[in-house]
């Protein structure tokens, strides 16, 4: 519910990012994605294990209009 409220409050299009629960990305890959999407509004479904791996890098996104969720209901978000 909180994520849906956040989505509804956005004034620009939101880019949804998810690599699923099996794939893990490296910090280097995260930095490249962050560079490309830094001026975008992003909702990223990122499992907790991935968040733990990227914990140092995730602190850097506090100034961006990004939301990181460990789980999202894609049917509700994209429906």
Image (cartoon, grey):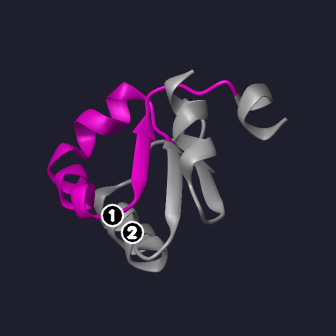
Q: Which residues are magenta?
A: 45-73
Q: Mark 2 sits on what residue?
A: 34
Pointer 2 or 1: first along the chain: 2
Q: Residue furthest right?
A: 79
Q: Are marks 2 and 1 in contact (CB under 8 Å)?
A: yes
Residue 25 drawn at (x, y percent): 42, 51
> Above or below — where is 30 with respect to 21?
below
Q: What residue do we see at 56% from left, 54% from top? A: 10
- Few, some or many residues within 10 Å of mark 2 (<14, 14–19, 20+): some
Residue placed most toward the observer, 64 or 35: 64
Residue 22 seen in this snapshot: no
Give the residue number, with chain letter if any, for mark 1: 64
Q: Is residue 28 magenta?
A: no
Q: Which of the image's four quarters has the C terminus?
A: top right
Q: Residue at x 45, y 69 (%)?
A: 33
Q: Residue at x 51, y 57 (%)?
A: 42
- Drawn side of residue 1 relative to residue 32, left or right: right
Q: Is residue 30 left or right of residue 62?
A: right
SS of the residue under disc 2: helix
Secondary structure of the residue carrying tag 1 is loop
Left or right of 7, for residue 65: left
Closer to viewer: mark 2 or mark 1: 1
Q: How many marks?
A: 2
Viewer-proximal residue among 8 and 42: 8
Tell me the number on the disc at residue 7: none
Label 1 neighbour load within 10 Å: few <14, some 14-19, many 20+: some
The residue depicted at 50 percent of the width and 46 percent of the height is 44
Q: Judge whether 25 appears above or below 47 on screen.
A: below
Residue 72 visible somewhere in the drawing: yes
**Can you tell which quarter of the image residue 77 is in?**
top right
Residue 76 at what x, y percent from top left? 75, 27
Q: Position of residue 24 (x, y in %)?
A: 45, 43
């Amino acid at each position: 519910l909180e994520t849906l409220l956040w989505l509804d409050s956005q004034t620009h299009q939101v880019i949804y990012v998810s690599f699923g629960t099996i794939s893990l990305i490296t910090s280097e890959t995260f930095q490249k994605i962050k560079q490309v999407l830094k001026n975008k509004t992003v909702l990223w479904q990122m499992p907790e294990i991935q968040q733990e791996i990227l914990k140092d890098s995730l602190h850097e996104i506090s100034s961006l209009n990004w939301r990181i969720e460990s789980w999202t209901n894609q049917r509700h978000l994209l429906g």
